[in-house]
């Protein structure tokens, strides 16, 4: 009896240590996504999301994956779905600490973009057109070897709506 009780206590401690499981789920590569996934595919791959929001024409799933420490309002991953079609429009990867993304930005197709927000404000980004009507956008850097705090994988057709300053520079 005492042996069974000890085993139950150990199992309970292990279960309590897993929390919501967010820090134990492996973080995928952003390029693992084709943008052909449906919401059910994401949940099947990553489990239930930590946060869900919806509005007119959209629905998002937010995830905390990996060992990064973040505040309660920041999420490592956001999946943006159009409504009513349910099509996955974009996948956003936010890094708590800027990270190197040079390995993802390879090839002659990398383009540099600048959003001019006034005389003393601008935002830099790099983009790479990928197969399958996808564009990878690294926000906040001007050279591939710079650190990045946000990556966005987006359908090319959606770029003019979300990033018109990048869409206008693509062939």
Image (cartoon, helix red, strand yellow):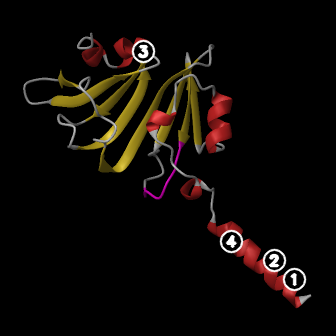
The circle drawn on residue 158 is 3
User: Cα distance, mark 1 to mark 2?
Assistant: 6 Å
Residue closest to the eye, 130 or 51: 130
Magenta range is 63-69
| Mark 3 burial class by Cα count in 10 Å: few <14, some 14-19, many 20+ | some
- Residue at 51%, 44% in the rendered image: 28
Q: Earlier in the sequence, mark 4 or mark 3?
A: 4
Report the residue marked by disc 2.
8
User: Cα distance, mark 2 to mark 4?
Assistant: 10 Å
* C-beta proximity under 8 Å, tags 2 and 3: no
The circle drawn on residue 109 is none
The quadrant the C terminus occupies is top left
Query: Quarter of the image holding residue 163?
Result: top left
Report the residue marked by disc 4.
14
User: Cα distance, mark 1 to mark 3?
Assistant: 57 Å
Query: Quarter of the image holding residue 44?
Result: top right
């Amino acid at each position: 009896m005492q042996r069974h009780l000890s085993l139950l206590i150990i199992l309970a401690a292990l279960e309590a240590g897993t929390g919501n499981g967010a820090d134990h789920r492996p973080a995928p590569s952003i390029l693992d996504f084709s943008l052909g996934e449906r919401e059910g595919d994401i949940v099947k791959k990553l489990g239930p999301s930590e946060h869900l929001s919806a509005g007119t024409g959209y629905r998002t799933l937010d995830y905390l994956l990996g060992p990064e420490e973040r505040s309660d309002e920041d999420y490592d991953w956001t999946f943006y779905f159009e409504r009513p079609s349910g099509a996955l429009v974009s996948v956003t990867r936010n890094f708590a600490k800027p990270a190197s993304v040079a390995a993802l930005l390879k090839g002659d197709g990398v383009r540099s973009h600048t959003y001019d927000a006034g005389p003393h404000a601008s935002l830099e980004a790099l983009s790479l057109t990928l197969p399958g009507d996808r564009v990878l956008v690294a926000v906040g850097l001007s050279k591939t070897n710079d650190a990045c705090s946000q990556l966005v994988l987006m359908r090319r057709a959606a770029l003019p709506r979300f990033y018109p300053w990048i869409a206008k520079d693509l062939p």
